[in-house]
Image (cartoon, rainbow, N blue to C red):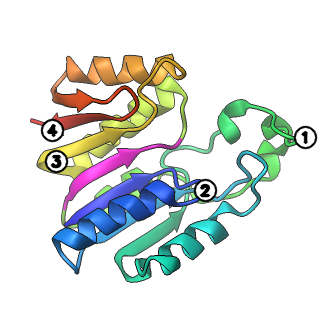
């Protein structure tokens, strides 16, 4: 099983999906994409991600790309948090770009599932979902986090995709699943 995970923060959902994949096949790999920028006052969140993966014995089943899924964007959803101003920091923050498009070039196999939990801007998420569609196998699952009233743009994008070539598998009010047809 091969998975894709966009947006790591501290690695909890990445570890969960990696453990799920590993239980199904011990040789599973989950590729994650995150630019490793300060988020919610946590500097170098990737240090925490690696620690979580190691704690649960998942380091052999994960591959991390320190990248933006698409073009460079403002971090922290544009929200100032504990003195961290994402707009003031934007110019100095660095990570590779266009990881989803690059995976399409490099990766000969397609992903069985993809988790979108990174940038919460609707237009960015829409581009991520389009890129993920090309990376998923037929019948592959696209999972959106934060499909709830706190993030109306994500909820709207989930609904839009459900009406345009994806089958909605359901939502629990926070996480939504779409199946590539």
Q: Residue visible at 22% across and 22% down?
A: 162
- Residue 43 percent coordinates (x, y): 77, 59
Quarter of the image that includes the C terminus: top left
| Residue, disc 3 | 140
| Residue, disc 2 | 35
Of badges 4 and 1, nearer the viewer stands 1
Secondary structure state at the residue bearing disc 2: loop
**Residue 106 vertical placement versus 134 (above, below):** below
Secondary structure state at the residue bearing disc 4: strand
Of badges 1 and 3, nearer the viewer stands 1
Label whose residue precedes the other's in the sequence (4 or 1): 1
Give the Cα separation between the discs numbered 3 and 2. Answer: 25 Å
Give the Cα separation between the discs numbered 4 and 1. Answer: 41 Å
| Residue, disc 1 | 83
Left or right, 131 with respect to 53, comes to left
**In the drawing, what numbered circle is on residue 180?**
4
Residue contact between numbered discs 2 and 1, judged by CB atoms under 8 Å? no
Quarter of the image that includes the N terminus: bottom left
Q: Is residue 155 magenta?
A: no
Q: Residue visible at 62% across and 45% down?
A: 72
Magenta segment: 110-118
Label whose residue precedes the other's in the sequence (4 or 3): 3
Left or right, 103 with respect to 2, comes to right
Q: Considering depth in this image, is 24 or 93 the residue closer to the camera?
A: 24
């Amino acid at each position: 099983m091969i998975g894709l995970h966009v947006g790591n923060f501290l690695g909890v959902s990445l570890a969960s999906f990696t453990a799920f994949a590993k239980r199904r096949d011990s040789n599973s790999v989950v590729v994650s994409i995150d630019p490793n920028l300060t988020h919610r006052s946590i500097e170098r969140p990737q240090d925490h991600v690696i620690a979580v993966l190691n704690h649960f014995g998942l380091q052999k089943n994960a591959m991390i790309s320190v990248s933006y899924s698409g073009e460079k964007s403002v971090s922290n959803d544009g929200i100032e948090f504990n003195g961290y101003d994402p707009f003031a920091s934007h110019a100095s923050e660095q990570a590779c770009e266009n990881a989803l498009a690059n995976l399409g070039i490099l990766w000969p196999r397609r992903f069985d599932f993809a988790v979108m939990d990174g940038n919460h801007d609707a237009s960015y998420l829409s581009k991520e979902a389009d890129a993920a569609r090309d990376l998923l196998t037929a019948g592959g699952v696209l999972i959106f986090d934060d499909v709830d009233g706190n993030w109306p743009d994500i909820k709207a994008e989930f609904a839009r995709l459900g009406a345009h070539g994806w089958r909605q598998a359901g939502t629990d009010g926070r996480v939504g699943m779409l199946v590539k047809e």
